[in-house]
Amino acid sequence: MKLAYVVSRYPFVSHVFILREVLALRRAGVEVETFTIRRSGAEHVLSADDREAAATTHAIVPPRPLDLLAAHMTALATGPGRYASTLALALRLRGRGARALLWQVFYFGEAALMWRACRRMGIRHVHAHHANVASDVALLAARLGGAGWSWSFTMHGSTEFFDVREHRLQQKVELASFVVCVSHHGRSQLMRLVDTSHWDKLRVVRCGVDVTAFAPGERDEREAPLEVLTVGRVDPVKGQPLLIEAVAELRRRGVDARLTFVGDGPGLAELTALADRLGVADRVEFPGAVGQDEIRAYYRRAGAFALPSFAEGLPVVLIEAMACGLPVVASRITGIPELVEDGVSGLLITPARGDELADALGALAADPALRAEMGRAGRAKVVAEFDIERTTADLLAVFTEYVGGAQP
C-alpha cells in the first residue's frame, strides 16, 4: 500500500502525533510519502525524528515557477475536462469574500503540484490531517487524478468546529472516501452535518502513544509541593491563565504547588506577566517548547497534569501524561471524557471554572495515595485502548478496507 500524507506544517511541535502515526504505518509495511504545505521553522524541528522527517518531506509552498507551470500543463494535457472540473470545484468550495476565492485558486495551484508528485511515485490515495488547507489540497489533488484516485482526512475536532462553513466540513465529508475521527464526540459532530448515507464512512480511530517509551518512572509522592505539568501551545483556547490563577489560589489556601508550562507561542509573555502580577512567578516555570527527546523527563518529574481547555478534540498530551502514570485534571468537554474517567483516572472540571480547577489540584496535593491510584488507572486505560500498535492496526484496517480492497 502506498499513501501520501499531507499536513499544513510537518514536522511541527504540535503535530508530533502525526509523525508517530507515519512511523508506525511504515513499521507495518505501508509506504508513506509525507508532504507539507509549508516548511516548519527550525524552532519546530526539535528531535532526531523531526530532523529526519524534515529532510524527507516534500514541501509544496513556495513552489519553483517552472515546476508549477509543468504541473498544470501536464494536468491540463492529461485530462482537460477533469482539469476544468477540478478548478470549478475549487471555486465552489470557497468561503466568504474575495480573499477566500483567491485562496481557493492557490489551493488549486498547490493541488496540481501534489498530484504530479504522487503520479510520479505511483501513489493514488492522499490522506490529510485536519480539515484545513491540507484537506483542501488533498481533495483537489485526488480529483485531478480522476478514476482510481481517492482521498481521506483525519478530523481532530477542536477549532475546525468553530467555523463549519469556513472549513467546508459538510462538503469535505461528502467528497472524502472516508474520515478518521479521533473521538466519538468528533464523529457525532460530523454526523449532524451530513446525510445518514455518509455516516458509515466516519470511522473512530484513536491517536496512539508508545506505551513503552511513555511509561511511569520513579516519582516522589510527597505531599508538598505538588508539581503540576501542562503541555501545549500558548493559545486562548487552552485556558492556560486559569492554571496560573489556580496556583495563586492554592497559595492563598496555604497549599504549596508549582507549575511547569511546556509550550511556546506569542501569548507566552502575557502568561509570564500574569504570574508576576499574581505573585507566583517563583512557582511557575516556562521552559518553552520541548522536543520528544526531552519531554518524557518532564512527565516523569511531575506529580499531576492539568489541561483546562475550552475546546479540544482528544488531546494527545493527556494520553501521554496518563501513559506516564500521572493523574490528570482536565475540562469536561468534547472527547476528553472518553479518555479520562472522572474520579478514577483523573478529575474533570467544568470549563472556565477556575475554582473547580483549584479544588481539584488541591485534592491531589493533599492525597499522594489518590494520585498514585489515579495514575495506575490512567496508565491501564492508555495501555488497553491507546497503545500505538493497537491504534495503528485499527487505522491500517480502515486504509485496507477503502484503499487496499474493494470499496464498501
Image: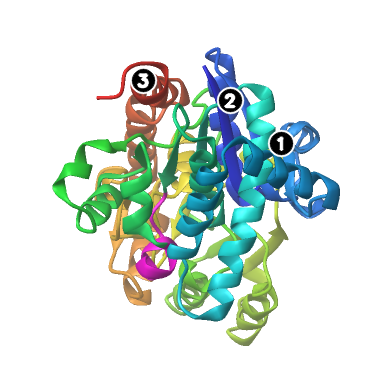
Where 225 falls versus 20 (above or below)? below
Residue type at mark 2 is: Ile
Q: How many C-alpha atoms fall within 10 Å of the one at disc 2: few (<14), some, or many (≥20)?
A: many
Q: CA distance from mark 1 to mark 2?
A: 32 Å
Q: Give the dominant element type of the magenta stretch: helix, strand or loop.
A: helix
What's the residue type where badge 1 is placed?
Asp
Q: Which mark is residue 119?
A: none
> Picture coordinates of residue 243 (x, y %)?
49, 69
Query: Could you tell me the amino acid type at mark 3?
Result: Ala
Vertical placement of residue 33 versus 335, above or below:
above
- Which residues lie in the magenta part? 156-167
Instruction: Name the residue tied to disc 2.
Output: 123
Residue 27 in view of the camera? yes
| Residue 11 magenta-highlighted | no
Q: Residue at x 54, y 71 (%)?
A: 101
x 36%, y 58%: residue: 169
Q: Which residue is mark 3?
A: 397
Residue 293 is tagged as 1
Q: CA distance from mark 1 to mark 3?
A: 30 Å
Q: Residues within 10 Å of mark 3 (few under 14, many from 20)?
A: few
Residue 395, image x, y percentages: 40, 27
* Alpha carbon separation for disc pair 2 and 3: 18 Å
Mark 1 or 3: the one toward you: 3
**Lower sequence index among marks 1 and 3:** 1
